[in-house]
Image (cartoon, rainbow, N blue to C red):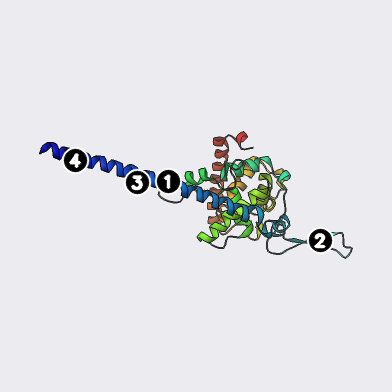
Amino acid sequence: MAEAETTTLGQRIGSWFRWIAGASVLIGTIVGIGTVVAIVVGVVLYQNYVVLNPGPHVERDHIRSIIAQESPVYYADGSTRVGVFFDEEHRQYTSFEELPPAYVLSIIAAEDDRYWNHWGIDPVGILRAMRLNLSAGGVVAGGSTLTQQTAKNIYYRPDRSLRAKGIEFLNALRLEHRYSKPEILEFYANQFYVSGNGRGLGIGARHFFNKDVSRLTLAECAFLAGLVKGPANYDPFLGSAARSERNTERAHNRTRYVLGRLVEEDAARLV
């Protein structure tokens, strides 16, 4: 009787193992097929919406029309420049070749140290940000790339909805497909918010240091790279004396952070 019971228990265990093995094979097959289908659908969507039909808003002329919104004003002779009327924001366009190397190194170290290697979206950066946020118990890091930030700055993301984030994601892929890394960085450097109605590195250099971008020092470039996290928090010219003092201290701390990132990431590697 005991032997019969033992045999029955062994048979049951064997049956369980066979059932689990069969279910595992079935699930693996379904997951495998699902993965293949997802890849195929992703390739088709990418080809259609990024490569073949990205939309006129990614054309260079359209992007430049957004960034360089300024109208020169001349004397009656038609050639002597009086000044500039600005549509909505002050602009002073700076090409990539005119960007100080120290600024390029600083903005990449501070915002996107894998910029030269990713394809507009950085899964490694997203996972790293998730890990840091979980460890801190709050949002202390973001996973968006400079390309995503460029898309957001150019096309003005209206809110933080999933739809808006999805469009931003798609526009980042479109920018990466159509333009080189230096070109995207050029767009970014001319579109980030500085203060009031001014945008871009040229305005930042003039507003904070009364300089042309070509004369910026390493520390000044580090400050302007760190500024993008919250310009109003680092502008010493805003508000009361107490606020100016707080902003100045924040600016010093933020600049030290960016300089520290340059050392940590080995600036030469970020070129």
Q: Amino acid at mark 4?
A: Leu
Mark closest to the chain's N terminus, 3 or 4 = 4
Residue 9: mark: 4
**Residue 81, percent from left and from top:** 83, 59
Image-quadrant location for residue 59? bottom right
The CA distance from mark 1 to mark 3 is: 10 Å
Residue 23: mark: 3
Residue 192 in view here: no
Nearer to us of marks 4 and 2 is 4
Q: Amino acid at mark 2?
A: Val
Q: Is residue 138 left or right of residue 226?
A: left
Q: Amino acid at mark 1?
A: Thr
Q: Residues within 10 Å of mark 1 (few under 14, many from 20)?
A: few
Kindly check if marks 4 and 2 are in contact, taking CB atoms under 8 A apart as contact.
Answer: no
Q: Dot 1 corresponds to which residue?
A: 29
Mark closest to the chain's N terminus, 1 or 3 = 3
Secondary structure found at label 2: strand
Q: Nearer the viewer, residue 148 or 249?
A: 148
The CA distance from mark 4 to mark 1 is: 30 Å
